[in-house]
């Protein structure tokens, strides 16, 4: 079965109704031929997802992907109920990111995709209105995936180089292959890039100030906490430029709906500074693109490129 055939069988369901079904919808076998290389669209050295998802500049969109997904109550409650985010925020990020990277870049994409899925088999509970949630409910699981698709498109278009409409649509089409590697129903997946943009905007309008996201953005309101050995007055001086830079880049990269629910101040002056920074990063791309691969890509992406014997610095440069 091809991606196109699969897409024709799926429909986008109403999120508010379907997410409250709180039932997992697991596909134990791939929905297309076992050989991912046989697909008309695939994840590999010739894909835009490979080119840009593992680029180290993706870190500039860290707060966007981590923040937006946790502005939806069901997902945030799963993190709150089943994670150590409040006691080990950085550690959780280190444990979450690699398996998703390996789903894209390893030589066992199905294996790693199913591991990511299976991590979530027992993540379930209730939210504030008493309704149930389950992490493998297709509407909720696809929302988590959508934040990574958005991050890939947004970071590339903002900080690396401007993408054409056709390139954004290609990344979205490739993201369908990416999603199928997890083995979860795609019934809520948009079928075109335009539908994805509509879906994204509609989901952003559902954002609420969850306990998880209010906590996770505290450093943007209050500043990064200093080391215990440094006196507070000294840290305030030392951390001022650090906090300023983090607020500029991280708050600047957020959808306005998230800034609003998290009470993150953002002024037209800050937007102009952010736009100048983003333009500088795009202008510097030809120089950054000459860096050694180990510096330009995460370790998991680097391993994938080396295994394929391809130099991505020569690909898809606009």
Image: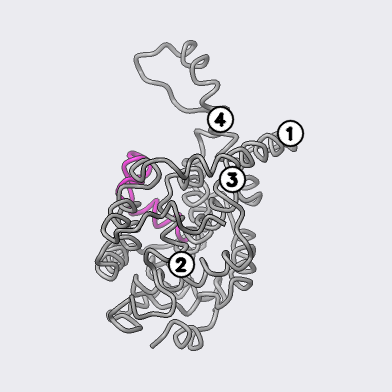
Q: Quadrant of residue 23?
A: bottom left
Q: Is mark 2 on a helix, strand or loop?
A: helix
Disc marking residue 269 = 1
Q: Which of 59 and 118 is in front in this view?
A: 59
Q: What element carries label 1?
A: helix
Say if mark 3 contacts mark 2, CB within 8 Å. Answer: no
Q: Name the residue under label 2.
A: 140
What is the spatial separation of the Cα atoms under label 4 and label 1, in whole angstroms?
14 Å
**Residue of label 4:** 245
Compared to residue 149, the image places residue 256 above or below, namely above
Q: Is residue 291 magenta?
A: no
In the picture, the quarter occupied by the N terminus is: bottom left
- Residue 95 as seen in the image, left or right of residue 131: left
For this rendering, which residue is in front, 211 or 286?
A: 286
Q: Residues within 10 Å of mark 4 (few under 14, many from 20)?
A: few
> Magenta region's main secondary structure?
helix
Q: Which one is earlier in the sequence, the residue at label 3 or at label 1? A: 3
Horizontally, residue 275 falls left or right of residue 57, namely right
Q: State how far apart marks 3 and 2 are (Cα).
A: 23 Å
> Residue 111, percent across and down?
24, 68
Residue 85 highlighted magenta (yes or no): yes
- Residue 202 in percent (x, y) is at 63, 65
Gap in Å between the C-alphas at discs 1 and 2?
Answer: 36 Å
- Nearest to the eye among marks 3 and 2: give it: 3
Give the residues in magenta.
Answer: 74-95
Which label was assigned to residue 253?
Answer: 3
Q: Which quadrant is the C terminus positioned in?
A: bottom right
- Residue 201 in the image, given as x and y percentages of width and height: 64, 62
Q: Which of 107 and 305 is in front in this view?
A: 305
Among numbered discs 3 and 4, the one appearing first in the sequence:
4
State the CA–CA distance, disc 2 to disc 4: 32 Å
């Amino acid at each position: 079965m091809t991606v196109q055939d699969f897409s024709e069988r799926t429909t986008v369901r109403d999120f508010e109704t379907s997410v409250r079904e709180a039932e997992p919808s697991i596909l134990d076998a791939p929905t297309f031929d076992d050989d991912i290389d046989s697909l008309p669209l695939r994840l590999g050295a010739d894909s835009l997802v490979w080119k840009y998802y593992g680029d180290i500049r993706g870190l500039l969109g860290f707060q966007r992907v981590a923040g937006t997904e946790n502005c939806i109550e069901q997902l945030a409650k799963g993190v709150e109920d089943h994670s150590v985010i409040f006691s080990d925020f950085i550690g959780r990020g280190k444990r979450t990111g690699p398996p998703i990277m390996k789903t894209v870049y390893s030589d066992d994409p199905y294996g790693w995709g199913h591991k990511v899925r299976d991590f979530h088999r027992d993540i379930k509970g209730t939210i504030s209105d008493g309704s149930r949630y389950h992490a493998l409910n297709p509407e909720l699981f696809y929302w988590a995936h959508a934040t990574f698709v958005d991050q890939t498109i947004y970071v590339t278009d903002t900080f690396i180089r401007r993408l054409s409409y056709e390139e954004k649509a290609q990344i979205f089409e490739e993201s369908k292959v990416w999603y199928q590697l997890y083995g979860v129903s795609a019934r809520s997946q948009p079928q075109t890039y335009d539908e994805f943009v509509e879906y994204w905007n509609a989901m952003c309008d559902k954002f609420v100030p969850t306990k998880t996201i209010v906590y996770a953005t505290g450093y943007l309101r209050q500043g990064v906490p200093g080391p215990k050995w440094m006196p507070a007055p000294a840290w305030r001086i030392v951390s001022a430029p650090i906090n300023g830079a983090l607020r500029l880049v991280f708050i600047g990269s957020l959808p306005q709906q998230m800034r609003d629910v998290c009470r993150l101040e953002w002024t037209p002056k800050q937007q102009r500074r952010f736009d100048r920074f983003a333009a500088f990063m795009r202008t510097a791309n030809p120089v950054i693109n000459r860096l050694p691969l180990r510096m330009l890509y995460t370790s998991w992406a680097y391993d994938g490129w080396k295994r394929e014997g391809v130099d991505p610095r020569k690909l898809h440069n606009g």
